[in-house]
Image (cartoon, grey):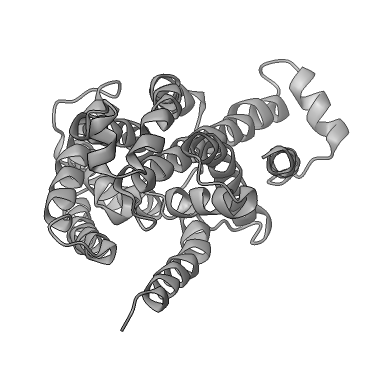
């Protein structure tokens, strides 16, 4: 775990440095320091402190939330393929956000993550109830994918009702982007992260007991149903706050726990949840900065990079699972 934390710290420093230097205008280290110390009305000061810095902080915060959400779902459901975007949670959150933005539902900005959480809870719980009727974990994932696809169609249908001038903004939202985000967006996500990140990590003790099986966990005094409900609420809280600000960002939640398990060779829920927080933060920061640096002056949304990385990982996980099953 130590060397993984060190590697993540190095990558985070490199990603944050790229985030401060790359863009229009390009800066060097000295230029960033000077811009940071300049007066509040200096254009370079505004670029560095009000555009680039909050984007870096938001990427770390959102990535940490998504990484933990994936670890909680995978360990609580004992399903290595579980993730918010694969269970329809992200789609449910996005549908609420799109409905509020386009249809003008009377929900304020501060209440939007809470409303999105309700949407994610309803969809996620429904998918879990339907999918768990079969013992095959792939059924749960396929049920979630079908639901997510349907919800994406609903979101697109709603967005087409918006003003033509907003089409570009909505399209960027659907891709999952951190572009043009400010400190206001950071403060929208921060309270949810402050509450649910510690709560999610604290649940690791119960998750370790759940790994022994539902009957054994119940005999040891763990309320299995209540624990899974609390995990789902925590997962939706972490995911909804992110989706409300950045749009649905896929596969960070899915692959972060697997990276931790492979790197540490540990299935301990505390190691996986804590590690997924760090790895998820670094993954999203790296994806966002790749989208800025590799295609500058154009920009590719962070959600596109996470899908390009995560989709092959999902296929490998499915393939390895099917190969282990007897024919």
User: Residue 57 placed where, x, y %?
Assistant: 58, 31
The quadrant in which residue 100 appears is top left
The residue lying at 75 percent from left, 22 percent from top is 36
The residue lying at 73 percent from left, 15 percent from top is 39
Q: Is residue 48 above or below residue 256?
A: above
Does residue 21 show up?
no
Q: Quadrant of the N terminus?
A: top right
Front in this rendered view, residue 272 or 24: 272
The quadrant in which residue 203 appears is top left
User: Residue 297 placed where, x, y %?
Assistant: 65, 56
User: Residue 89 placed where, x, y %?
Assistant: 26, 46
Q: How many numbered markers are drawn?
A: 0
User: Residue 144 placed where, x, y %?
Assistant: 23, 58
The residue lying at 74 percent from left, 42 percent from top is 3
Q: Is residue 62 above or below residue 164?
A: above
User: As drawn, which residue projects farthest toward the right?
Assistant: 30
Front in this rendered view, residue 259 or 56: 259
Q: Quadrant of the C terminus?
A: bottom left
Front in this rendered view, residue 248 or 318: 318
Does residue 65 show up?
yes
User: As drawn, which residue projects farthest toward the top?
Assistant: 39
Left/right of residue 133 with respect to residue 291 in the rendered view? left
Q: Is residue 177 above or below residue 225?
A: below
């Amino acid at each position: 775990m130590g060397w993984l934390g060190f590697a993540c710290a190095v990558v985070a420093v490199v990603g944050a440095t790229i985030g401060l230097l790359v863009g229009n205008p390009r800066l060097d280290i000295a230029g960033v320091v000077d811009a940071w110390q300049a007066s509040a009305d200096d254009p370079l000061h505004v670029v560095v402190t009000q555009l680039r810095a909050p984007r870096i902080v938001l990427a770390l915060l959102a990535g940490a939330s998504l990484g933990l959400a994936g670890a909680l779902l995978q360990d609580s459901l004992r399903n290595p393929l579980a993730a918010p975007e694969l269970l329809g949670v992200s789609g449910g959150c996005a549908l609420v956000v799109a409905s509020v933005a386009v249809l003008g539902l009377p929900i304020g900005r501060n209440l939007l993550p809470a409303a999105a959480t309700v949407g994610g809870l309803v969809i996620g719980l429904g998918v879990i109830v339907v999918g768990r009727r079969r013992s095959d974990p792939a059924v749960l994932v396929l049920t979630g994918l079908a639901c997510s696809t349907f919800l994406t169609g609903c979101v697109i249908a709603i967005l087409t009702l918006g003003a033509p001038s907003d089409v570009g903004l909505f399209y960027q939202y659907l891709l999952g982007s951190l572009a043009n985000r400010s400190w206001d967006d950071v403060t929208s996500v921060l309270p949810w992260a402050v509450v649910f990140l510690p709560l999610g990590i604290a649940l690791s003790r119960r998750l370790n007991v759940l790994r022994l099986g539902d009957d054994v966990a119940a005999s040891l005094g763990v309320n299995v149903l209540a624990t899974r409900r609390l995990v789902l609420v925590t997962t939706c809280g972490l995911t909804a706050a992110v989706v409300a600000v950045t749009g649905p960002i896929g596969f960070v939640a899915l692959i972060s726990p697997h990276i931790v398990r492979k790197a540490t060779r540990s299935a301990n829920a505390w190691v996986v949840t804590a590690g997924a927080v760090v790895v998820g933060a670094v993954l999203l920061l790296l994806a966002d900065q790749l989208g800025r640096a590799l295609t500058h002056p154009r920009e590719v949304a962070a959600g596109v990079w996470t899908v390009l990385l995560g989709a092959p990982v999902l296929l490998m996980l499915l393939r390895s699972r099917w190969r282990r099953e007897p024919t």
